[in-house]
Image (tube, helix red, strand yellow):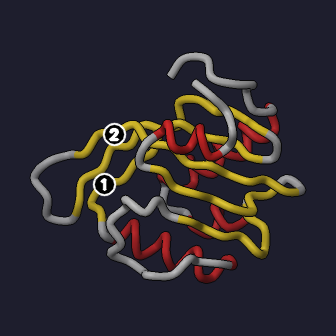
Amino acid sequence: MGNRAPKAAKENVELLRRFYEFFNQRDLDAVLELCSEDVELYKDPEVVEVVAAFTPRGPDRVAQYLRAWLESWDEYVVRPQEFVQSGEEIAAFVQLRARGKGAQFDIEEEMADVFAIRKGRIARLRLYVRPGDALESIGASA
């Protein structure tokens, strides 16, 4: 990914590494422990919506969404590669490896997530198909 903007603060990087570790283990209870009570999840408009047509808000709705999303994949592993911070937002550039239920082919893509962290907890998560869109959303440049 190269150098983009200031690296994220160490405590935020550790929080997000734990998020991805728990997510990859499909331990949504542990994921939610890292989130605020009013956590929100926003999807990139290009993400095919097969789970819900709403913006999940609050731990129960976010867990419901993530659980349904993960159940639609035989394999879904997200490996963070780099974290870039701008203000209270952090872009996590990730390598995705996935295989849909019953699919014969793996998906391998570079994508990005943008997190807002408040008081040491994840308050908002936005998913991006194109890493450049995530970087633009936090006001950072390549």
Residue at numbered disc 2: 109
Residue 114, position as x, y percentages in the image: 62, 49
- The image quarter containing residue 52 is bottom left
Front residue (pair 83, 64) = 83
* Residue at the extreme top: 2
Front residue (pair 91, 63) = 91
Residue 123, position as x, y percentages in the image: 75, 63
* Residue at the extreme left: 104
Q: Residue at x 62, y 28 (%)?
A: 141
Q: Residue at x 31, y 54 (%)?
A: 75
Front residue (pair 134, 38) = 134
Alpha carbon of mark 2 to alpha carbon of mark 1: how far?
14 Å
| Crowd band around label 2 with a 10 angstrom C-alpha radius: few (<14), some (14–19), many (20+) | some
Q: Which mark is residue 102?
A: none
Say which element carries label 1.
strand
| Crowd band around label 1 with a 10 angstrom C-alpha radius: few (<14), some (14–19), many (20+) | some
- The image quarter containing residue 27 is bottom right
From the viewer's perspective, tell me whether residue 6 is left or right of residue 60: right
- The image quarter containing residue 57 is bottom right
Question: Hey, what amino acid is under mark 1?
Answer: Glu
Name the image quarter holding the C terminus.
Answer: top right
Front residue (pair 33, 83) = 83
Question: Hey, what amino acid is under mark 2?
Answer: Glu
Work out whether 105 lies above or below 95: below
Residue 12, position as x, y percentages in the image: 77, 41
Q: Residue at x 69, y 39 (%)?
A: 139
Residue at numbered disc 1: 75
Marks 2,1: beta carbons within 8 A: no
Residue 134, position as x, y percentages in the image: 56, 44
| Foreground label between 2 and 1 | 2
Which is more N-terminal, label 1 or label 2? 1
Say which element carries label 2.
strand
